[in-house]
Amino acid sequence: MSNPSLLILPGDGIGPEVMAEVRKVIDWFGEKRGIRFDVSEDLVGGCAYDAHGTPLTDATMAKAQEVDAVLLGAVGGPKYDKLDFSVKPERGLLRLRKEMDLFANLRPAQCFDALADFSSLKKDIVSGLDIMIIRELTSGVYFGEPRGIIKEGNERVGINTQRYTESEIARVARSAFELARKRSNKVCSMEKANVMESGVLWRDVVQEIHDAEYPDVELSHMYADAGAMQLTRWPKQFDVIVTDNLFGDLLSDLAAMLTGSLGMLPSASLGLPMANGRPKALYEPVHGSAPDIAGTGKANPCACILSFAMALRYSFDLGDEATRLEKAVEKVLADGVRTADLMQSGDGTSASTVEMGQAVIAALDASL
Ligand code: NAD
């Protein structure tokens, strides 16, 4: 049997710097654990625009559709800020998400004990936190029609439409229940059924899918505004949260910040299963291309490394190996190795991107 395939798109700014460390981790799994991938690499974002005049070529898009998983660094940078909207680096990423139909965005909010002091909340509220927010990514108010700014009498009116079909709600609800079964078996669905019809439908459909297909999973419903309050009051009450595109955008950022630095946050975007049973999948750190530190060797590679851990778990069913990698990152932090973003003033010397990568490899070696 051939190896599973991975398409790597390092992108712009710190993307290639953090991805170079992930490549070493991928090689480690091949050499030390016999888990080999057929890896190919290509351009996305500003670098693709520089080379081809488009942020994502049709050939790269076709490759992304064929592989078992795509791993992306980051796109964008000031050099491209003045480009026409249609060829901006972000369009490359949006095209990938849209054409691969990646409707479930998974954002874990996990607090490594060694970083609990970085949270804006008290240590006992966040330490040991491990929740997963699933945001619907391809529909809702960011895509609904009609939209626009129109003239009504002598003033302008801005319009966006929140629109969800039953099937759009059902498929993301299924993703949440499936995931919960692999975790603590609890889902909380968040909407605004008190003031929005789309919220009433959301609540009904999530409940119906639960009752018909996942009665073993504990399900609760919460209004999204109350959910925001509960996330800051006592986040450990949650396991999996499923919510729509707009509320998910806000709630996942809120939950992410409970845990400290952008440099630590991975994500996955999943679609429907392919013929081989694996879901269409794109893994990427939450952070951007960080032009302010690009080229200085200061970028934290952990978010990208942890995104690869998510790929091991969700695309390749290698949960134990994913845990091995997550524990290696945890050990490195516990040992006090820190990139600059994880330090407070007076904390001593920071590790470079490469040194952080080396420390993770050493911790992986120690795990054998
Ligand atoms: P950013 O995430 O790139 O940076 C925000 C801040 O966090 C910066 O101070 C940066 O130095 C720091 N930071 C981010 N990642 C880090 C890491 N791994 N290690 C250490 N520090 C890190 O967001 P921004 O500055 O708003 O955007 C910069 C560019 O990235 C823009 O062109 C934006 O459009 C793009 N962007 C891309 C993505 C993506 O590719 N998914 C996401 C967000 C922003």
Image: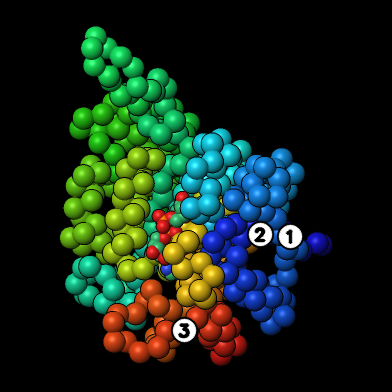
Lower position in the chain sequence, tag 3 or tag 1: 1
Contact check, label 3 and label 2, Cβ < 8 Å: no
Q: Distance between the residues labelled 3 and 1?
A: 29 Å
Q: Mark 2 points at which residue?
A: 8
Label 3, secondary structure: give it.
Answer: loop
Amino acid at the residue labelled 2: Ile
Res. 31 visible in picture: yes
Label pair 2/1, CB-CB below 8 angstroms: yes
Q: Which comes sooner in the sequence, label 3 or label 2?
A: 2
What amino acid is labelled 1 in the image?
Answer: Ser
Question: Residue 325 vs residue 66: left or right?
Answer: left
Judged left or right of residue 250, residue 357 is right
Residue 365, given in percent of the width and then of the height, sits at 60, 88
Residue reaching furthest top?
Answer: 153
- Tell me residue 308's x, y (percent): 57, 65
In terms of secondary structure, where does tag 1 sit? strand
Q: Nearer the viewer, residue 358 or 270?
A: 358
Which amino acid type is marked by label 3? Ala
Depth check, front residue: 113 or 180? 113
What quarter of the picture does the N terminus occupy? bottom right
Residue for point 46% across, 84% down: 351
Q: Residue furthest right?
A: 1
Disc 3 versus disc 2: nearer the observer: 3
Q: Is residue 360 visible?
A: no
In the displayed structure, would residue 61 be above or below residue 2?
Answer: above
Q: How crowded is mark 1: few (under 14 residues within 10 Å), some or many (20 or more)?
A: few
